[in-house]
Structures are given as structure tokens and as C-alpha cells.
Amino acid sequence: MSTWQSETLFSRPKTISIPIDQDHELVKLSGMLDWRKLIIVAMERRAEVRKSTSGPEPEYRALLGALTLMSVKNLQYRDVEDLIRNYVPARCLCDLLESDWSPDFATIFQFQKMLGPAGIQQLNEEILKFAECKGLADPRELMSDTTAQEARIPYPNEAGLMNRFMGLVEKKISRLRGSFDKVKDKVRKAVTKTKGLLRNAHLFAKGREQKRKIEKKMYHTAKEIQSLIASTIDSGANMSSKAAADLLKLNSVMKDLLPQIRHFLTTGFVAAKKIIHLQMPEVYAIVRGKAGKSVEFGIKWGINRIGGGFLSGFLIQDGRNCSDTAFCMESVRRHIAVFGTPPVEFGFDRGGDCDSNLKRIKRLGVKHVGIAPRGKKKWSVPEKLENKIKRARAQVEGSIGTIKSSRYGFTKPRAHSKPALVGCGHRAILGFNMRKLVIMSAANAT
């Protein structure tokens, strides 16, 4: 009986030579961008965040190419590592065609962590200036809008938050020793009790009153564990490890959340500025009033769209649910900070309409302020320009929808902290602008 022979007659080559498609978008980006200016931004950012300049310098060119690849393709770190190692256009983008080296996922992660949201935003501003120099972007036209960046978190009900707290406490405390050994049994019993109560609330509680009774029992259990952890920490426990620091932060967040949970269980109304996530307490409930989605859980962004379709994004009041009236002024200021001059035409929706805004924006140097009027008021610009601004304003909504798609991943990214969430937002906008560069350059060439 013969056996299957998997070996071939000739050995397979370890290296191959294939032609590079010069029309591939990654290849075009590698030869189009001014990498020297991007490297200067990364070097300046490293000098800001590092306490010491000792140690080897990062491979800026390759790592900026990796960041570009993540932005354009909406990839995770391990996927980027694999593509750079085995995909020719990706190696061309990172300028590694003549090298056997490629960055691993940990190096790419540390580089982007070093850049932070502010660094990625600065890179995006350099791309906008580059597009202006090439005649692809027209900063004389500015259209603005607000949008919510949703976080990838479960719906923040009281029972779920308390159950999540107990599970995280058990996980963190299992890695600690010393004073925490005395409370581990109590924590395990409390976690088991909480899981049972949550199961009863989901499966067997009939009516709101029964659920409230079960949630009150969960509240007392969570409060007891929170107080127990606080007293253990105050007794002089060793808090030098990362797990201890995480437990301290978690317990502090829960201390603020427990009165908010009690307020809801007592009154039936959600407390003001309620914490909706234990590990990202900085995200907010943003009331949007949309059909089918009245509330979005995340942070609020301002989006500026300039002539040519390029975008820039920023947070107002640290991402809180601020009024459009306040954002309206800030969008023009951010535009001036990037390009050095005010736009000639500015458009915004009716949320920013007020007499003071019109006067202040004109004082900044904007010639035509096309804010949609409320009620039966007339536009402050001529009818021809009004129609132009309406068409341009509609394109802002389309651009926001594009960056929120799975291609760029602006909304619900895989981020477990607010800085990572903001960084993913800037990275999505960066990918949108880089792809817009390729498309506009090809259109102008023809």
C-alpha cells in the first residue's frame, strides 16, 4: 500500500521575485507623501513624552508606514505585522523592500502609544497641509458638524455594572498577595452571590418591582466589597504592582458610581453625569434623538470638512455632550490653527444659529457665514451661496458615515481606554484623508 508523498521533486525557493503594481494605493502612498515632515512630527512627539532620550531611536520611516497601513486598512496590530512581513505593497509602504527586517506587533503598538492621540492628530494636520500644497484641498471652504464616537461597551444598566465590578475585583485580587489574601474568600463568595442574583433578575424576576428588589441586594453586596477593598488598601497593602493600581482605580470609580446606582434604585431616574463604564469612566451618554437610537454611549467629536473633501476631527470639552453653539466657534478656531488663515465660506447646521455666533465668526475673518437659520429666519448669505452651502453641508454627513464604516472603524473600535478610543478616531480620519489623496491625485492626473 503506497503512502501519500507530500514532498515535491524539486525544493521550493525561499525567495521569489515579483513585479510591483505601481498603481496599487499603498505603492502610490509610499512615493507621494512627504515622509521627512512626518518623521519630524514623530521625533518631536517622542521628545515631548519621553523623560530620557537614551536608548535606540525608533525606525521612524517603517513605523510611520505601519501606522499608515493600519489607518488605510483598519487593521489590528498582529495583522499589520503579518502584512508587512509577507505583503509586497505593505513592505514598499514601509520602505523595507531592500531589508529583511520588519517590525513586530509590540513595536508598532509602543510606537503608536508614544505618538498618542495628539501625535496622530498632528500627522493628520500635516497631510491636510500637504494636500493644500498639491492643490487637492481648498481651505477657503469649511463645513462643520458634530458626531458621536460610540465605544465598544455593553448597555450600562445597574445590574450589569455591579456584576462587572465584582468580576473585575475577583480577577485583579487573584494576582495580589499579602493583605489581600485575607479578603479573597469573601470576594469569591460575593461574586458567586452576585452572579446568582443577576441570573434571577434576568430569568425569574417578573415585573419592575421584583427586579428592583434583586438589584438592591446586589447594591448592598457591591457596596460591602467596595468598602472591604478600600479598608484593605488603607491598612497599608502593597500597591506597587499594576494589578494593585488597576484595583485602586476600579475601587475609586465604583465609590463614585454607587451613589448614582442608589439614586436610580430609589427614584427611578438616572443621576446626572452617570458613570457608564468602569474601565472607561470618561465616556458619556450622548443624547442624539435619532430614530431607533436616542442615546449613544461614547464621546462627542467635531468634524471639519474643507474643500476637496478632506477631514479633520477634534474633541470639544474633552468629548462631553456640549452644545452645538459652543462647537460652532471652536471649529473655525481649529481651522485657523491648522491653515493659518480663516475660511472664506463657513457652513453649519441650525444648532449653531445665534446672533452672537454670527458676529464672532465674522470677527475671526470669515467673509460668508452660512449657518442654517432657526424657524422662519432668512439666511445671512445670498441665495446662490445658500444653495452651495446646503450641498456642501450634505456632503459632511456622507463623510462622517464613511469614516464610521468598517473600512475605517471610527465608531466602536477595539479600544479599552479613552486615549485609545480617541487615537482610533484620529487614525480613522487619517486613513480617510490618505485614501482621498490617492483618489484625488489619480483624478487630477487624468
Image (cartoon, grey):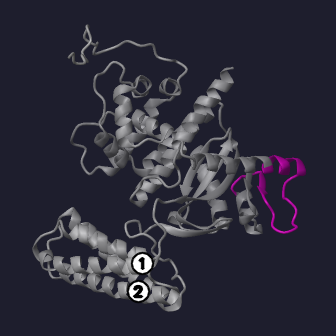
Tell me where residue 38 appears, x and y as whole percent: 44, 36
- Disc 1 residue crowd, few under 14, some 14–19, many 20+, Cα 10 Å: many
Using the numbered discs, state the Cα–Cα distance from disc 2 to disc 1 in whole angstroms. Answer: 9 Å
User: Of residues 324 and 250, which is closer to you in this image?
Assistant: 250
Query: Which of the 4 image quarters holds residue 159?
Result: bottom left
Q: Who comes first in sequence, dot 2 or dot 1?
A: 1
Could you tell me if the residues under marks 2 and 1 are in contact, i.e. CB atoms within 8 Å?
yes
Does the magenta portion include 239?
no
**Above or below, 51 relative to 41:** below
* Residue 290 higher or lower than 157, as above or below: above
Image quadrant in which you'd find residue 310: top right
Residue 371 within the magenta-colored segment of the rendering: yes
Q: Is residue 105 visible?
A: yes
Q: Which residues are magenta?
A: 364-390
Task: Mark 2: give few (<14), some (14-19) or many (20+) Cα within 10 Å.
Answer: some
Name the residue that disc number 1 marks.
159
Amino acid at the residue labelled 1: Ala
Q: Residue at x 68, y 24 (%)?
A: 444
**Residue shown at the point (81%, 67%) measured from the top left:** 374
Q: Residue 208: x and y, percent?
A: 52, 86
Q: Amino acid at mark 2?
A: Ile
Residue lying farthest to the front in this orientation: 1
Identified at 43% across, 87% down, the residue is 262
Residue 49 rendering spot, x and y as whole percentages: 33, 51
Numbered disc 1: secondary structure: helix
Identify the residue under disc 2: 214
Q: Secondary structure at mark 2?
A: helix
At a point 74% along the width and 59% down the height, the residue shown is 349
In this rendering, is residue 274 above or below 80? Answer: below
| 179 sits left or right of 15 in the view | left
